[in-house]
C-alpha cells in the first residue's frame, strides 16, 4: 500500500515536471544539472545523458568527480522519468500522459528505469562536468514500454469475398512526404510512434497493439522504422516478398496512425498467413524523419 501511495504522489509530481524534448539539452530546475534524451527508433531505444557540473571549490578533480557521480545516482530516477515522458506512444498519448494517469504503470516503469545499466561515465573535454549516459531499450525483457503490452492478442477481422492475392513475407508502408490528415483539410508528415495504428480508407481499424502477439511486441515492437526502402530493416523484418503499399493519409492528434489503401488491406486480410504476419509485427514503415 505504501508503494502504491508513493507511486501516486510521483505521478502527480510528474505531471508538473518539465519534460525533455528529444535531442534537446534542458535545465532540470536543479542547479548544476542538464539532461538530454534522444529516441533511436531504428534501434528501438532511448539514449539519456545526464550532466553534472563539477564543484570548483572541491580540492581535487577526482573528489569532485566522485561527488558528482553520487549526485547523479541520487536523482537518476527523476531524470529518467523526465527523459522518457515525451516518448510518443500512440496517436493521442505520450508516455508521460500514461504514467501520470496510472500509478500502477508508473511503479512498474520506474522499476525498469532504476534497473537500466549505465553504459558510459566520463568527464567533459574541459573537465568542468561529469557526464553519465544510459541506453533504455523500448522492447525486450527490460523494455520500458513492456508494461503496455497486451497479455493476449485480439483477433483481426478477416475480410470475406475474393480478392487476388498471395502469401507475403511482410508489409512495407511508404509514408514519406506530406499526407492528408484524415478528418481535416491539413497535410502532415507521418511521425513515428511505439504503437502506430493502421486503418483502411473507410476508417475501419486494421491493426493496433491489442491485435499483435505479445511475444512479437516484446521481441521488436509493433513496426520497424526506416528512412529508405534500402534500409537493412526492410529485408530483415518484412522479408524478400513484402506487400508494398503507399500510405494514403495520417490520423490522430500526433499524426502517427496510417491510412492504407483498401485494395491492399483486402489482400492482407483475405489469407490467414497474411493476417499472421501483421500479428507478428513483420511491418516496416518508411518515414521522412525518425526524430
Image: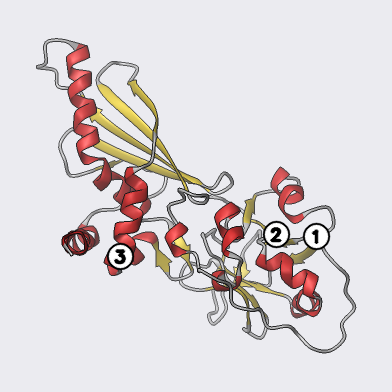
Residue located beneath label 1 in the image: 169
Horizontal and vertical percent for residue 101? 29, 69
Residue that protrudes farthest toward the top in the picture = 60
Q: In this view, does 163 lie to the left or right of 215?
A: right
Give the class, few, some or many, for how many residues have Cα within 10 Å of label 2's Cα (few <14, many ≥20): many
Q: Is residue 79 left or right of residue 231?
A: left
Q: Is residue 238 left or right of residue 53?
A: right
Q: Which of marks 3 and 1 is nearer the N terminus?
A: 3
Q: Which of marks 2 and 3 is nearer the N terminus?
A: 3
Nearest the eye: 29 or 186: 29
Nearest the eye: 131 or 255: 131
> Can see residue 2?
yes
The kind of secondary structure element at disc 3 is: helix
> Can see residue 20?
no
Horizontal and vertical percent for residue 25? 33, 40
* Mark-to-mark CA distance, 2 and 3: 31 Å
Residue drawn where x is 41% and y is 67% of the image:
93
Above or below 193: residue 56? above
Colouring convention used in this rendered image of the protein: secondary structure
Give the class, few, some or many, for how many residues have Cα within 10 Å of label 1's Cα (few <14, many ≥20): many
Of the numbered discs in the image, which one, if any, rests on residue 282?
Answer: 2
Tell me the quarter of the image containing the N terminus.
bottom left
Horizontal and vertical percent for residue 130? 28, 24
Q: Earlier in the sequence, mark 2 or mark 1?
A: 1
* Mark-to-mark CA distance, 3 and 1: 38 Å
Mark 2 touching mark 1, by CB under 8 A?
yes
Residue located beneath label 3 in the image: 104
The kind of secondary structure element at disc 2 is: loop
Horizontal and vertical percent for residue 159? 76, 85
Amino acid at each position: 500500500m505504501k508503494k502504491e501511495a508513493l507511486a501516486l504522489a510521483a505521478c502527480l509530481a510528474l505531471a508538473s515536471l518539465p519534460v525533455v524534448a528529444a535531442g534537446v539539452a534542458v535545465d532540470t530546475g536543479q542547479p548544476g544539472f542538464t539532461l538530454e534524451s534522444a529516441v533511436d527508433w531504428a534501434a528501438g531505444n532511448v539514449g539519456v545523458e545526464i550532466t553534472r557540473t563539477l564543484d570548483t571549490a572541491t580540492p581535487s578533480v577526482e573528489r569532485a568527480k566522485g561527488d558528482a557521480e553520487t549526485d547523479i545516482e541520487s536523482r537518476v530516477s527523476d531524470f529518467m522519468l523526465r527523459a522518457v515522458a515525451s516518448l510518443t506512444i500512440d496517436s493521442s498519448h505520450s508516455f508521460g500522459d500514461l504514467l501520470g494517469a496510472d500509478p500502477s504503470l508508473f511503479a512498474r516503469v520506474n522499476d525498469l528505469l532504476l534497473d537500466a545499466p549505465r553504459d558510459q561515465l566520463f568527464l567533459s573535454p574541459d573537465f568542468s562536468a561529469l557526464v553519465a549516459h544510459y541506453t533504455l531499450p523500448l522492447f525486450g525483457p527490460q523494455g520500458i514500454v513492456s508494461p503496455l503490452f497486451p497479455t493476449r492478442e485480439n483477433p483481426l477481422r478477416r475480410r470475406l469475398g475474393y480478392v487476388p492475392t498471395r502469401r507475403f513475407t511482410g508489409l512495407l508502408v511508404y509514408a514519406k512526404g506530406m499526407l492528408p490528415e484524415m478528418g481535416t483539410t491539413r497535410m502532415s508528415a507521418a511521425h513515428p510512434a511505439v504503437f502506430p495504428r493502421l486503418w483502411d480508407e473507410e476508417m475501419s481499424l486494421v491493426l493496433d497493439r491489442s491485435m499483435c502477439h505479445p511475444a512479437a511486441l516484446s521481441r521488436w515492437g509493433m513496426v520497424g522504422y526506416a528512412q529508405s526502402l534500402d534500409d537493412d530493416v526492410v529485408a530483415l523484418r518484412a522479408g524478400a516478398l513484402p506487400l508494398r503499399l503507399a500510405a494514403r493519409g495520417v490520423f490522430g492528434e500526433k499524426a502517427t496512425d496510417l491510412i492504407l489503401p483498401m485494395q491492399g488491406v483486402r489482400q492482407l486480410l483475405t489469407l490467414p498467413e497474411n493476417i499472421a504476419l501483421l500479428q507478428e509485427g513483420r511491418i516496416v514503415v518508411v518515414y521522412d524523419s525518425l526524430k
